[in-house]
Amino acid sequence: MSSLEKIRQERLKKLKELEKLGQTAYTSFNQKKQPISKIRNLKGETVYTAGRIYSKRGHGKLIFADLKDETAKIQLMFKLDTAGQKVFKILQLVDIGDIVYVKGKVGESLRGEISIIVEDFKVLTKSLRPLPEKWHGLKDVEERYRRRYVDLLVNDEVKEIFLKRTKVVQLLRKYLDKEGFIEVETPILQTIYGGATAKPFITHHNALDIDLYLRISDELYLKRLIVGGFEKVYEIGKDFRNEGMSRVHNPEFTMIEFYWAYADYNKLMEFTEKLLSQIAKDITGSYKVSYQGTVYDLTPPWPRVSYTKLFKDEIDLDLSKIKTEEKLLEVIKKRNLLAKDELEIGYANLVDKIYKKHLRPNIKGPVFLIDHPTELKPLAKRKEDNPDLVASFQVLIGGEEYVNAYNELNDPIDQKNRWLQEEEAGERGAEEHQVLDEDYITALEYGMPPTAGWGLGVDRFTAFLTDQPTIKDVILFPTLRPENNE
């Protein structure tokens, strides 16, 4: 029998002993509970609270324990003459991790520590497994993700990260609501996936006998609402992409997208730098954010760098003169820009691969990378002064993308032609490509006003603000391989 199982068996015996003393070890709760954080300021008053036992020490007629709830921790002082013989009998059967109810008067120990001098005490929930003292180090990292409930119990700093994540989402809502945006909900199950270039998850609806996709983006439905007369809409929700995993990718992730009618990407850039820098200051106290040993200054304004100019300046590749997949492949092979196993089908996929390998990792930021080649953004509107480029931007910080935004393509003919080109790449073997959505084309034919759209990865932005090396550290329950599946 393992040492853990021995402990569990011992605690099961204690549970039965508690029942003999008239204690229901998994009881309901309908009594008064005061937050421990407030109790600490109520010296001399009788208080009522509940929480989890984190330590127990002492013997004989004086025993101490530490009680913790969501708000704070406080010492419990058990005196035989105050608590009584029955409480002391119960106390002998209490283990670290048990959840208990306490009534007593707030006072001080001889060492001056604020304490509850216990008068009444009851076990509410018996813990059958011991709490680890501390989980840390790489050897425990996957176990921490897998048993997040234990991670939160023993690591206060982890709980603080998720409280900050909640605040990030609250602030995004606050500032968009203040700007006049309407929060909406759009379908997660979709008959046609769209809004991004990504591989979807597929499921099946039995009653309708149809395959459905988990959404990869909120974009196309939100833009349908712009067609329908809303001028400012946003959604915060889960998206799902059946792609590889990395420190910045999880199969399900949280996105916030908004769409703003009668605005363009220049207006969105001004709004973006003000929005994200203010949230950074609200969370960290400064526009300067330290992330993984490097300080990034988010003070507006942020520089704007042309995507095609970046290629020309950094690797001497003029995309305005290399417009076909065949010609680009010649350059790639001649200059050894990509290995053979890195080659992909489609001009846009090849350009993106070069960018992610040779250019993006070297961009410190924050910076707006603007005006991408049209082939890279099938949903973005062409620039009027140069139809080979689209009016688009990405926000880059520390070599990673945080925001993707552009003027929305509202020409139904151009949109359909671009989707047909995407599907042609898919027929040639491109694993990730966009697909034609005829209903969305119909919506555009009713007329969508000039609109600019914007998307932010909430997980990635939160990891940046809380200095976490991977988004798994800011997702409560990240996707993991099952324990019994090697």
Image (cartoon, grey):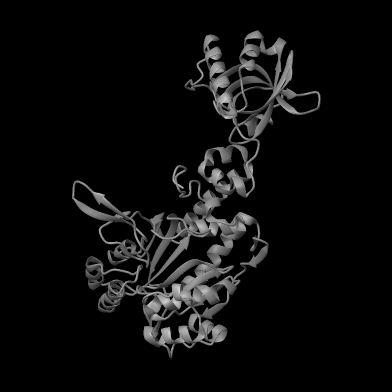
Whether residue 384 can be seen here: no
Locate residue 213: give its quadrant: bottom left
Question: Horizontal placement of 6 versus 409: left or right?
Answer: right
Q: x and y percent of residue 208 in the render?
A: 18, 50
Q: In the picture, which quadrant includes the N terminus? A: top right
Front residue of 191 and 358: 358
Whether residue 202 can be seen here: yes
Most extreme residue toward the bottom is: 321
Q: x and y percent of residue 85 in the render?
A: 66, 8
Q: x and y percent of residue 29 in the render?
A: 49, 22
Q: x and y percent of residue 278 in the render?
A: 58, 61
Front residue of 230 and 11: 11
Q: Residue at x 44, y 72 (%)?
A: 341
Locate residue 105: give its quadrant: top right
Question: Horizontal placement of 107 versus 46: left or right?
Answer: right
Most extreme residue toward the left is: 208
Question: Horizontal placement of 61 versus 250: left or right?
Answer: right
Q: How many marks?
A: 0
Most extreme residue toward the right is: 111
- Is residue 298 placed above or below 116 in the rendered structure? below
Front residue of 180 and 30: 30
Front residue of 356 and 239: 356
Q: Residue at x 73, y 28 (%)?
A: 114
Question: Horizontal placement of 371 versus 4: left or right?
Answer: left
- Is residue 50 placed above or below 469 in the rendered structure? above
